[in-house]
Amino acid sequence: MQVNTNRLRPIFLTFEQWLPRWSLQHRLCCSKPVSVHSNEESRADKFKTQIATGPRFHYFVKGASINKQQPVITDDLIDTDKHAYLPEDSESGNSRTVCFETYGCQMNVNDTEIAWSILQKKGYQRTSDVAEADVVLLVTCSIREKAEQTIWNRLRQLTAMKKRRLKTRVPMKIGVLGCMAERLKSELLEREKLLDVLAGPDAYRDLPRLLSVAHGGQQASNVLLSLEETYADVMPVHHSPQARQVSIMRGCDNMCSYCIVPFTRGRERSRPVSSILEEVHILSEQGVKEVTLLGQNVNSYRDTSEEQFCSSEPGQLSRGFRTVYRARPGGLRFADLLDRVSLIDPDMRIRFTSPHPKDFPDEVLQLIKERANICKQIHLPAQSGSSTVLQAMRRGYSREAYLELVDNIKRIIPGVSLSSDFISGFCGETEEDHLQTLSLIREVRYNVGFLFAYSMRKKTHAFHRLQDDVPAEVKQRRLEELICMFREEATKVNSALIGRTQLVLVEGESKRSAQDLCGRNDGNLKVIFPRQEVAGQPTDTHTSPINPGDYVLVKVHFHSAVAVSYDVFYHTESQQDFSLSIILYV
């Protein structure tokens, strides 16, 4: 390939090359060459002086130590909180509108609330209308291929919308946040060129700067993972008035062979307990009735932010469970946090997700049993019912250990509601392995289940060490069989609720009908009941409408695998009246 050398310009020049051309021309025609040499020497001396007294390498490195013999650059000359290459006030939103689209798990919902809190403080306005938005941010999931394909399709739709936008309007900027941003940064930015901003799960604080660069016409990206970021000092901006999520930890260290999470969200780090308690106190004062503690591996919470929490004792695991990493000593553990959170407001329901079965020592189970406001519902992801497959998945337990844990949970917490995750068609799964998973679902009898066909992810242990050898049609057939088995057993479990009295937290209007309301019981089962006026107390004759955030006392008369219908007795703002209502109505 021929290179046009006329278009190439050197970046670093010698002193002779640096001298302006006019001085060389002057040398040829001037009758006084001495003065030319004098001028050259003068300029050379001035240049050397500037180099000697100019900024050193430390000027360009934030937080670097400075040698005492070198000129000191003081704080009044450098504003380390501003980016020198951006105009002043460039990070301000200037009332630009931003639209969030959230895909995936509850952690992504919480990430959306964090990102919006950061942008709101910079002057951005939020809209739900994509057509009116100046910025569209997709909070993405990378756990399965189908989830990623949904984002690719949406990006192409938004790009077409961006091109059709009138030239008289502010150009639309498109951004991808979250797990997919970290995993597919090269494809998103370089190959497809479908977006302007890319921010990983630990880079939301940088969103104002990234958007500022994008508004200047450049692509902007920050997908660096952090060992410390928990957004502990960011108060999320919530939309649900009665139920909120509170993030307590981020990342995962379990390194299950199928899972991309450790590579997209980084290592485990826990938020200081003081900031968690402060946020829950604020939510209680706002009248929030339910809080869900969030984390990729929520019950492995371990706060070491204060010296008093540090000790040499490792955390306890469920019996028969192990980890792929060395046990870490010290820290305030999940049982301590759950204890403190549940004491803040006895009328506030407490849930937590998503846990790992290995982190359920008896002290956690006993606390759930004893505290009335800790929901008697546990998510217990099994993933498979075959010990062989569980070993290939690097789950750290066998089928037998899992069933022993289930028995222990049911013994300590009678009537507990259990939910689980299952993957069909993992690497090397045989028909016998599949049958063992079906039998596990039949034996445990879950109330709720989340079931998916296996989708191999790059970077994972399975991608490097295992073979995705189960055909797609076999995966789908096995998945359908798992779903049928789950529905069959869940229907049997829910049939036991017929005629029983339940306390339900009202969420709002049912999607089924505007004449119905919906909510969830203690076991996190969806409840549908007619919109009507009922008494506020068992002895009241006066009736009033039921509102979101109310507790309603109901009795079931119909059920399915995923929802139940109830007759309503009365409603109250406090769940402490529940014991009285049980006496009156059961």
Image: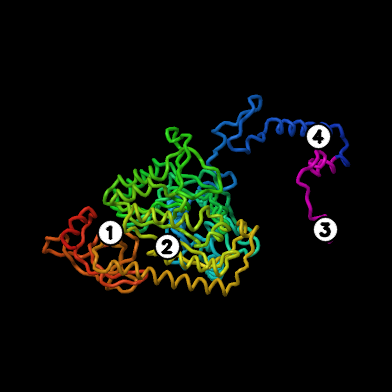
Give percent across and percent down for residue 254.
Answer: 53, 51
Quadrant where the C terminus sits is bottom left
Of labels 1 and 2, earlier in sequence is 2
Q: How is the image coloured?
A: rainbow
Helix, strand or loop at mark 3: loop
Q: How many marks?
A: 4
**Image-based side of 403 in relation to 508, left or right:** right
Q: Nearer the viewer, mark 1 or mark 4?
A: 1
Task: Locate residue 533, reporting x and y percent.
Answer: 19, 67
Using the rendered image of the protein, determine whether residue 218 is visible from the camera's viewpoint. no
Cα–Cα gap, marks 2 and 4: 62 Å
Residue for point 46% across, 35% down? 310
Task: Residue 40: give its label.
Answer: 4
Q: Amino acid at mark 3?
A: Val
Identify the magenta region.
Answer: 1-26
- Front-most of residues 250 and 508: 250
Q: CA distance from mark 1 to mark 4?
A: 82 Å
Q: N-terminal of the two: label 1 or label 4?
A: 4
User: Of marks 2 and 4, which one's residue comes earlier in the chain?
Assistant: 4
Q: Identify the residue position indicated by label 1 in the image.
A: 549
Q: Any mark on residue 3, and which?
A: 3
Q: Secondary structure at mark 4?
A: helix
